[in-house]
Image (tube, rainbow, N blue to C red):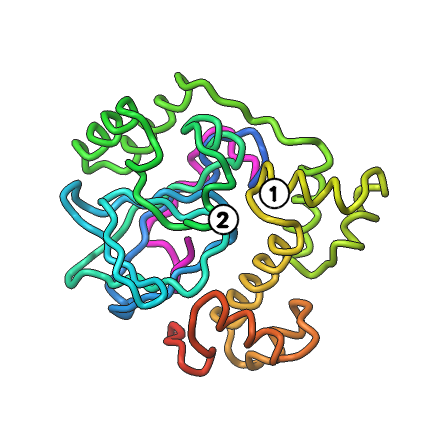
Amino acid sequence: MRLSGQPLLDFTDEIDGHLGTNGGGHIIEAYVFSCKHLEMSQPLFNDGIPTVIFMPNSADEVSLVKDGQLIKLKSVWVCCGVIKNIQWLMPEQLEHIFVLRFNLSVFYSAFNVSPSMFLSNPVCSFEDLVDERWLGIINEIYQTDNFEDKIAMMKNALSMSEKSSYLPYLVKIAIAHIDQRKGNTTVSELLSAIGGKVNQRWLQRNFIKYVGMAPKKYISLQRFICTYGLYNIDKSSGLSDAAMVSGYYDYNHFQKDFKQYLGIAPSRYSWVSR
């Protein structure tokens, strides 16, 4: 899950085995995100990487609006896959959230979750995915206010879980190429970059199986997030310039993606002032 602005606390560099999206680490990012500056209705979006969000208290609820329908989630919730037009109705006085982002394969295997389930339900309660053991671990995590301890408890639980970090080698190479290009590529270029060793059908099938979405969609998400990030950091050059630099062929192309993912036009979005 992505939110406007920078993390209040970032523990990513302290995570052992941090090797990137498809590397060997169990947790690839961990941070505390301040919510004080955010609008009360916050559009959600994600880059496809499994993300678990902890509200401050175990009794907290999460309220979302999707297609005009109110959805209630528990205090620990998951964002994964492609999020489209989902708004988070943030509680008043919410100070922060605690966010963990996971290695793709480790997440799906450790929690015994199929990537395909997020195709239709990309945001859900964590407790709807996991067994009683993990519910107990989450309860223990809520017993401490120290974020380093929370991370250590999750890492320890993962180390004792049956899991696999397996991704087909060519899928790893493809993801690395897309991430390195920040989405400024095409499926045809991707096939060439991995040496022409597989066809588009193989790549499509294995991306959906292991990543939870088609390669074209993963490319689109990374390009969109790159454009969003460029403009959110430096607005001096304009949004059209940021879109062109990121590989969009025109502003309308970016605007279409923006509306698809966030549900509103870029001109109506509350960009963070810097």
Pointer 1: what residue?
208
Q: Amino acid at mark 1?
A: Ile
Q: Is residue 125 magenta?
A: no
Provide residue 257's location: percent of width, then percent of height: 55, 69
Above/below status of 157 relative to 79:
above
- Which element is circle 1 on? helix
Above/below status of 202 relative to 73:
above
Q: Nearer the viewer, residue 140 or 134?
A: 134
Separation of marks 2 and 1 at Cα, in angstroms: 9 Å
Q: Is residue 12 magenta?
A: yes
User: Is the residue marked by circle 1 packed among few (<14), some (14-19), or many (20+) residues within 10 Å?
Assistant: some
Q: Nearer the viewer, residue 116 or 250?
A: 116
- Tell which circle, 2 or 1, labels the residue nearer the N-terminal end: 2
Quadrant of the rendered structure where residue 11 is?
top left
Give the number of the disc on residue 119.
Answer: 2
Identify the residue at horizontal 41%, vertical 19% (top origin).
Answer: 161
